[in-house]
Each structure stands twice: as structure tokens, then as C-alpha cells.
Amino acid sequence: MNLIEIEKKVIGEILTSKEIFDNLITLCDEFGSRFAGTESERKAVEFILNKFKEYNLDNPHLEEYEYNGWIRGTTELSITSPVKKKIKAISLPYCPSTPPNGIEGEIIDLGHGLPEDFEREKENIPGKIVLVTSFSPPYFKRWIHRVEKYGRAVEAGAIGFLFMNHYPGLLAPTGSARFNMEAEIPALGITKEDGEYIKRLMKKGKVRVRIKTKHTTKRMKSWNIVADIKGTEKPDEIIIIGAHFDGHDISQGAMDDAAGACIVMEVARTLAKYKGSFKRTIRFICFSAEEIGLIGSHSYVNQHKDIIKNIKFMLNLDGAGRAARPGVMLQGFPEMIPFLKKLTKDMNYPVPIADRLGMYSDYFPFVLEGIPSGTLAGGKAFKEFASGRGFGHTEADTVDKLDPRDMQEASMVVARLIMKLASTEEIPIKHKSKDEIIKLLEKYGYLEILRYEKRPDLDIIQV
């Protein structure tokens, strides 16, 4: 059976099966958030491993690693002056515990938390509690991640950090304050509505708040779930398709990223029926602990230094299935655009392909090793800078936000692309050297940002 015939059968299987949405419901409705270190995570690990076995993949197995886990405790936020009022708040992962009586300080509003906002107020930040929104304005040259804003607040001498959702709906946002390490100062998410209330109070004078938190950071174990379809002619050459399966502990994490993990599983299920048809090995990985620092993917790369040279391409599916008409956003490999366009020309389906390097999903550890990488993107990703997550990273990230048709469409695009990458005679894209990766990071201004974020285990950068 030739590749075109296999593609047609795979498309038909994806469109006529309800397996992908059944898996989503199991991960979200039955197991919950799958947050690292929870019983929900362990149930998901067992479920995905068993699915890989059921789908008859080659060598389905778990790969264990240790990391700094975080256990949510209690959080209190209260305005103490000029009024007394309790504010709904949730601690961001890796938020430390305060002294029993908490910490109290004056709020300083730094707007969107742009670098120039911190520079402008650098003399006024020490000893204050910084308030920033989750928004990055389109006019700014890049999206500013929460961890960068937090890192700038810490370095400037703040004693606390309030992360205000810029979307309405009484939804306090979450998201890790640091990567795989306990944070230095308390970090809390608050709703847009409460943030706007605080801003109105500040127009009348100084506003002081008290923060009380009690949480635990300790060493834990987690697992990546890995399985293959072994290649025939070039089995040592590997195409990786991966997504994280963990969500945040306050929600189901359906969009971010149970959907992506389910698409990995769906592509694995449908392609496994055609073992022996692909030249290269296709490796399927469901990463854990992405939400608290890309920990699973970093661990995978660190555990497999011996095969780095054999990985021809890594396709990340974080957020896949959220929107229609997905395309591929390459991560610092624009030289791959003509090759992918030629490879997908006969698909009779427009696959947008562009290049823009990011740092905040599971492709990044592979990029740091010089491995050609990309991520599935859709919607507005090719037209404008990201400005926020909507329901993502809030308790509203639930199954009902996803359309099964979008998940099927993403699965079809990924399956067809992966088949072509695994079957083409040559992939003419070379790995980048360490020096080339450092120059790439410098081009985007990321070396300075990584310093603010204090990311651990990134041996490639010396900052």
C-alpha cells in the first residue's frame, strides 16, 4: 500500500472514530487536572501507557525522573488600607510560604509588566507588592511571559507579586512562578475584576494588602510516557511527536493540554495500523510536568543525549485542537520552510508554515540541543502576537471549550505530516551547533530573559 492510500485510510479512521474525544473525557472528567505529583497524574500515566499498549505500538514504557514538586496549601489576600476587604486569590505554583502572620506591603501598579515599566519604576519597587496584568499588548515586539514579569519583580526588590487576569469572568489565573524551583516571594493570581477594583482604589491613594500563604515544595518523581512505530529502512532516524498531558491543579486542563496529548494518542492509534510502512522511527511522547517548567521534556532530553544526533524533527502539540486550520510554527529553523511546503504540497489542504522562536513549551529543550523543531499552531498565531490565554490557566479550562472537529482536523494534519517526514527519502535540515543556538537566542533577546527567569538545567547558556 502506497503512502497516498494510507493517508486516505488514516483520514477516514480519524473522521469516523470517537476515540479521541472519549480519551479527552477520560483524562479530564474522570481523572481531573493531572497536575504533577497528584493521584490524578498517576492515573493518567497508567491510562496513556495502557492506550499505547492497546494501540500495538512498539516498546511502550515509562521513563522516570525526579524534580521539585509543589503541593498547594492555603492562600489569603486582604486589603488592609484604605479599606478592609478579602480578595479572591490563588497562589501560583512554586509560591513559597509566608511567615505565619503573612507579609504586608503597598501595591505598585506596573501595568502590563513591560521591561520599560520595570525600568521606569525601579526606584519605587523595592519593598512593594507588584501588580501586573497577564496581557502583552500587540504593539510590543514580543509576548512577555508571566515568569519573566515575576523574575523582573524579584530582581527589582519586590516583596510580593500579583498577577491579574486581563480577561473578564471572575477567573483568577494560575501558572508557575518559577521553573522547577521554589519561588523567592509570594506570587498570587487575581481576577480582572478584583484587579480593576484595586486600581480604582489606588487612584485615591496608597493601597496596602496582606498576603498569607502556606505551601510545600519537595522532591518528587514523575514519568514521561514513550512508545514507537519502528522504522524499516532508517530505524535509527527518529521523528518525535509530543505533547504534555498535565494541567494545572485548579481545572481540568482540557485545552492545555489534554487535547494535545489526545492528538498524540490518536495519531499513534491510526498510524500503528500501518507498521512497516515508514522508513524512519516515529516516537510518541506524552510529557509530564510541563506546566511547572517543561520538566518532563528537559528530563527526556537529558536522559537521551546519546540519540540527539538521530532526532530529525520534533513536533510539539501543546494547544493543538483548540482552533481550526492548524499550521506549523517552526522554532528557529526558517530554512525548513521550503522543505515542508514542498513536502505538504500534495495534501490538497493548506498548511500554513512560518518560523518564530518561543521558549515556553516542550519544543524548547529540543531546540537547545539544536534539533529542528516546530509546534502546531492555529487561529491567530500566524497573524498577530499572542495576547493571552482566554480560558486557559483558569478553572474554566474544561472539556466543553473544545470542538471534536477541531481535534480531528489537527489529528489529520499531524498524521499526514508525520507520515511524510517519516517516509521521505531525505530530510535535508541540519542540527544547529551550540554557537548557532546561542546566536539564535541572542537574536530574540532571550538570553537576558532566561537570566531573569533563573531557569535551571539549561547548560547551553552561560548567563
Image: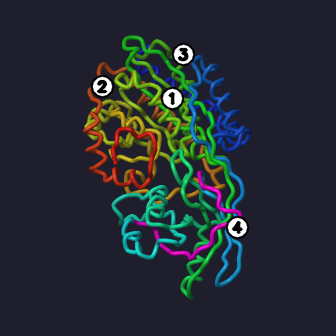
**Highlighted range, magenta:** 94-114
Say left or right for 334 vs 137. Answer: left
Q: CA distance from mark 2 to mark 4?
A: 60 Å
Q: Which mark is residue 58?
A: 3
Mark 2 or mark 3: name the one nearer the start of the chain.
3
- Mark 4 secondary-structure assignment: loop
Mark 2 or mark 4: name the one nearer the start of the chain.
4
- Mark 2 secondary-structure assignment: loop
Label 1: which residue? 11
- Contact between labelled residues 4 and 2, with CB atoms less than 8 Å apart: no
Pick the residue in front: 445 or 342.
445
Dividing the picture into quadrants, the one containing residue 89 is: bottom right
| Residue at 72% from the left image edge and 37% from the top image edge | 39
- Mark 1 secondary-structure assignment: helix
Pick the residue in front: 331 or 400.
331
Label 4: which residue? 101
Label 2: which residue? 427
Mark 2 or mark 1: name the one nearer the start of the chain.
1
- Contact between labelled residues 1 and 3, with CB atoms less than 8 Å apart: no
Q: CA distance from mark 2 to mark 3?
A: 23 Å
- Contact between labelled residues 3 and 2, with CB atoms less than 8 Å apart: no
| Residue at 50% from the left image edge and 14% from the top image edge | 275
Mark 3 or mark 4: name the one nearer the start of the chain.
3
- Mark 4 surroundings within 10 Å by alpha-carbon count, few (fewer than 14), some (14 through 19), many (20 or more): few
